[in-house]
Image (tube, rainbow, N blue to C red):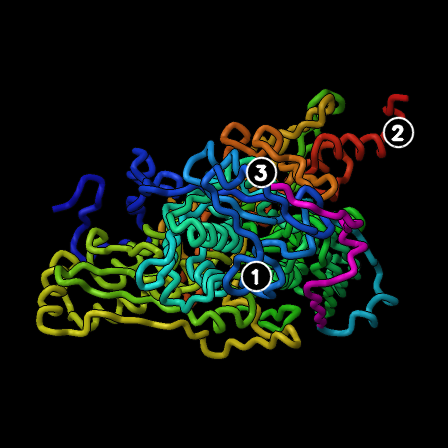
Amino acid sequence: MTAPGEPAGPPNARWVGSDLPRPDGRAKVDGTARYVDDIAVDGAWLGATVRSEIACGDLLGIDVDAAFAATGAVLVTAADVPGRNVVALLADDQPLLVAAAIAHWGEPLALVAAPSRSQLAAALACVRPRVRERPACFDAAHADHAFRTIEFARGDVDAVWAGAPFVVEGVYQTDAQEQMYIEPQGCIAWPPDDGGTVVVRGSLQCPYYVQKALCAALQLPPERARVIACEVGGGFGGKEDYPSVVACHAALLARAAKAPVRLVYDRHEDLLVTPKRHPSRVRHRTALARDGELLAMEIDVLLDGGAYTTLSPVVLSRAVLHATGPYRCANVRVRGRAVRTNHVPYGAFRGFGAPQVCFAIERHMDRIARALDLHPFALRRRNAFARGDVTATGQVLDAVAATEVLDAIAARTGCDRPRAPAAPGGRFRRGRGMSFFWHGAGFTGAGEQVLQSRVTVRLDGSGRVHVQAAATEIGQGTRAMFVAIAAESAGCLPQDVVVADADTAAVPNSGPTVASRTCMIVGGLVARAAATLRARIGAGDSATFRARATAYVRAGGDAAVELQYAPPAGVRWDDQRFAGDAYPTFAWAADVVEVAVDTATFAVTCTRFCTAVDVGRAIQPRLCEGQIEGGSLQALGFGHLEKVTARAGRFAEDRMATCIVPTAVDAPPMEVVLIEVPFAHGPFGAKGIGELPMDGGAPALAAAIEDALGVCCDHAPMTPERLLAAWLEAHPEEAIA
């Protein structure tokens, strides 16, 4: 019988392309979903972190008052780490706890856990670090160490400059951005059981990343480190690498206390010490023909990586690969650096380096259009990639949707035609701007081959299909997407599919839930595995699937299929030369933003947002549109609202009252046009689309503001203060003495 809210569907119904109910939806609406701080654990202690209040210096010692013993608390320092005192990730240069050198404000110096909040507060008051401050570096331009430098080129850039009719140069900057997930960071850790297994449950995106970190810190084999993802209240990349820190701290405390320990940050602590989007400075120099053809591009990308490597090398790689934008150019030279400063380490955030360089190239295209007196749409259309074109790394493009998204956005908004001039004067100025962008789906280069993601799809004794993968549900609809793919591929009903929790003891390592890869890469494996089961069971309609599957299992049939990712034939990448197929495929989009700018306050109101987005195939159209709307609103916030600054290395916006993000009140009417240009190797043609919407909103907003005010702002976020400064520079007669 069909449960309330579940589609019965006719036999042989098509689930891909429909809108199924979310398996996690009801619990999240009625409040029965259990996030990490909702989980009741008998005898659990509370944990806290003792942090540095300087950005650079030395830890000389930690003094502990005699009264500490009476609190019943435990104290953990670097000397108590049984394994390697590192956050195991890429470079392993970040300590779990400072042993000597302090590299950023808020860096963990020690950990404390106690049976109650009052005991914890009393214990923390007894702990006093002794430090010696040293000069710090907060300007990426003056940093003395690069975590990674990437350079690549195509053609002969130097030969073009002298004979080019036009050369246009520009510098573009973006600041840090806070993920502001609904639920702050948190984990619960249990001490080793009789078999020596440590269990951690937490709000996290990547269970196997956390397992790797636990194994390094606690000297454990993988089978003795079990990591379970709870319901996750949003991630946006912020719960990719940092949960490894929280999990290891909680596990160290649980080991010392010999009791479960809950370590959950409040919003204030989360805003102060967790990674943000990398600030950027991008320089463009472009040679052009008189008709606007791009003849040569020279681009320099600088990212502030903060104090430790974390994920900066892979953020940089995506940044430089997207730096040219979705535009053909025969002669390209790109250089990128991610450098060390004494800021809190910057990390992953939706888009992963692409929003920074997309802002730069789209602002630069608008600068070119002004210099050559060309319409911005015509300039983009003139240079847009087409199928068969070759990128700067030598990738021959397929499944290109540039024409489709540009045609769709023009038809919906008229952005390809000159706009009627606004009436002169008046307090509110109105403008319209556009952006055109692409985003590589999946990990960069050989990343997917290195991961070798695995997925299992199996039948149970009652004929249900179990999807086992480490992909986490962080609000984006992974469970519903897996249900649709598995049901379609296996030939069963959606209610016959069970999606396993992301638990390292129960599911294979399908890789992290990042990089717009879950649907295309992991979902592709699910589709193939489920189709294999379907072939084994034999033909029949969806209504009889359970009976046929049960009979197959009882007859001793092979009821499980495990598959491992292999790249499509012909895909090649050389990381040393930074050449080849950077991504399996790209998704494409174009945005148009309309604004009203108050010239009394320079506050910006978005009055309309329209986007045309190539998704390959919309597995669940409503979820697709929701992803696009949410990511686009984040992009608009990145463009003009979300100010994140640091003073002496400490983030100044340390409350939700000051760290402003757009809400439903700030959201303009949103129009989403889904375009489907399928990718042959994606499930049912699907591409990754989780990050793509983050890339285009800020530059389209900047173009609209420029159209409204007649002044240029190439530094995001475009706050009222920055707009006022640009206005006064253009209109010095209005400056007040």
In magenta segment, residue 126? yes
- Image coordinates of residue 255 in percent, x first then y, are 43, 54
Residue 348 lies left or right of residue 19; in this view the side is right
Query: Circle 2: is it few (<14), some (14-19), or many (20+) Cα within 10 Å?
Result: few
> Residue 535: horizontal and vertical position, in percent?
21, 72
Quarter of the rendering containing residue 163: bottom right
Which dot marks residue 126?
A: 3
Upstream in sequence: badge 1 or badge 3: 1
Question: The disc labelled 3 sits on which kind of residue?
Answer: Cys
Residues under labels 1 and 2: Cα distance?
54 Å
Looking at the rendered structure, the kind of residue marked 1 is: Val
Is mark 1 in CB contact (under 8 Å) with mark 2? no
First in residue order: circle 1 vs circle 2: 1
Question: In the rendering, at what x and y percent does residue 271 appear?
Answer: 58, 39
Marks 3 and 1: in contact by CB < 8 Å? Answer: no
Residue 159 placement: quadrant: bottom right
Q: Residue at x 55, y 46 (%)?
A: 409
- Seen at 59% across and 59% down, the residue is 311
* Mark found first going from the N terminus, 2 or 3: 3
Q: Is residue 527 visible?
A: yes
Please indicate, yes or no, whether residue 280 appears anywhere in the rendered image: no
Circle 2: element type: helix
Q: Nearer the viewer, mark 1 or mark 2?
A: 1
Magenta stretch, residue numbers: 124-153
Q: Is 702 drawn above or below residue 219 in the view shown?
A: above
Check residue 125 for magenta coloring: yes
Depth check, mark 1 against mark 3: the one in front is 3
Q: Which mark is residue 86?
A: 1
* Residue topped by disc 2: 732
Percent coordinates x, y for residue 178 in the rendering? 59, 42
Q: Secondary structure at mark 1?
A: loop
